[in-house]
Amino acid sequence: MNSSTAPAWPALDYAAWRDTAETLQLWTQVVGKVRLALTPWLNHSWHVPLYITARGLGTSPIPFDGESLEIDFDLVAHALSLRTSRGDTRTFPLQLQSVAHFHRAVMAALAELGVAVRIDDMPSEVPDPIRFAEDQVHAAYDPAAAHAFWRALVQVDRVFKLFRTGFIGKASPVHLFWGSFDLAVTRFSGRAAPMHPGGAPGLADAVTREAYSHEVSSAGFWPGSAAFPQAAFYSYAYPEPPGFRDRPVGPDGARFDTNLSEFILSYDVVRNAPSPDAALLEFLQTTYAAAADCGKWDRAALEAPLGQPGVPRPVG
């Protein structure tokens, strides 16, 4: 489907595109691990995610040998492009191909571009991982499904970025973590958090503990998984303050999931709402307020009205 005729908030039936979703996630992990291997560590692993672009997903510039590399998933033309600041480009199609084939193609393109890099080819945060170089199991690619997922991400990214403007404390970019395959935005109270216990599957404890070194209210969106087979929004607090899970949040349909230890809102509730933007903003704001109030954040010092184009935030 052409982007100009696609619905703004498309249907995302996880069961119907599960195979493509699993393959696409592993492809993003190959690219993400290239960024991880070449980029200096930034707090809370902010140096590793991908970003939503006007045509798909991209790395932003990655440093190498005094130059820059960018890798983009074009989910309109269905191609992977690798470009360097030297002016060189390599492109190959996104189509039915195994993770092993995709991995070989990416590493070969990097070698042709003069980018020397070695990555850990064991997938992160997925059940029963298979090394990229050996994975012939995941080989699905439905272009229409991948395009619909990206179209949903475009809308979610836009609303998340608007929500981010209402906070003047430390806040993360809006970014897609390829390990958990979720688009996330995180606010920080400014206070240090207790040491995280670690134990996240497929993630080193040192990474988890650095990510959660400070108190957070984090919200995000994921397309679904085998364990939770539906597209949904989530919001959690770390550490979870007393009373957090009992706070009323909106819109109707939002609930606290005790198995996941976070608030959940179905993507379908948002996309079918009279105003999807308003419904999603209500979920983001009320779940953040639950974390901030129960955690006794200094909200007066941390918050601001939502930003407006061309209008400086008033101070004083």
Image (spheres, rainbow, N blue to C red):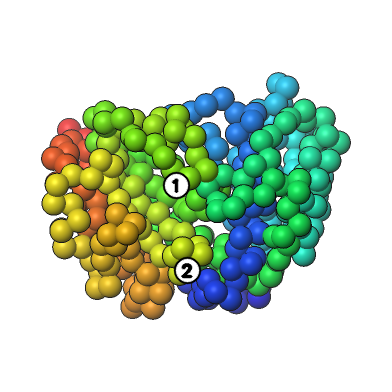
- Seen as rendered, the residue at the extreme front is 128
Q: Please, what is the three-letter code of the amino acid marked with disc 2?
A: Pro
Between residues 84 and 120, which one lies in front from this camera angle? 120
Query: In what element is the residue under mark 2?
Result: loop
| Quadrant of residue 111 within the rendered picture | top right
Mark 2 or mark 1, which has the lower sequence index? 1
Number of other residues with Cα within 10 Å of mark 1, as a class: few under 14, some 14 to 19, many 20 or more:
many
Q: Please, what is the three-letter code of the amino acid marked with disc 1?
A: Val
Residue 110 x %, y %: 79, 37
Q: Does residue 229 appear left or right of residue 145 in this picture?
A: left
Q: Does residue 197 appear left or right of residue 33 in this picture?
A: left
Between residues 34 and 225, which one lies in front from this camera angle? 225
Residue 59 x %, y %: 61, 42
Instruction: Read off the residue under disc 2.
Output: 229
Q: Does residue 201 appear left or right of residue 35 in this picture?
A: left
Q: Does residue 124 appear left or right of residue 310 in this picture?
A: right
Instruction: Read off the residue under disc 1.
Output: 174
Q: From this view, report whether residue 36 is shown above or below residue 21.
A: above
Q: From this view, report whether residue 73 is shown above or below residue 205.
A: below
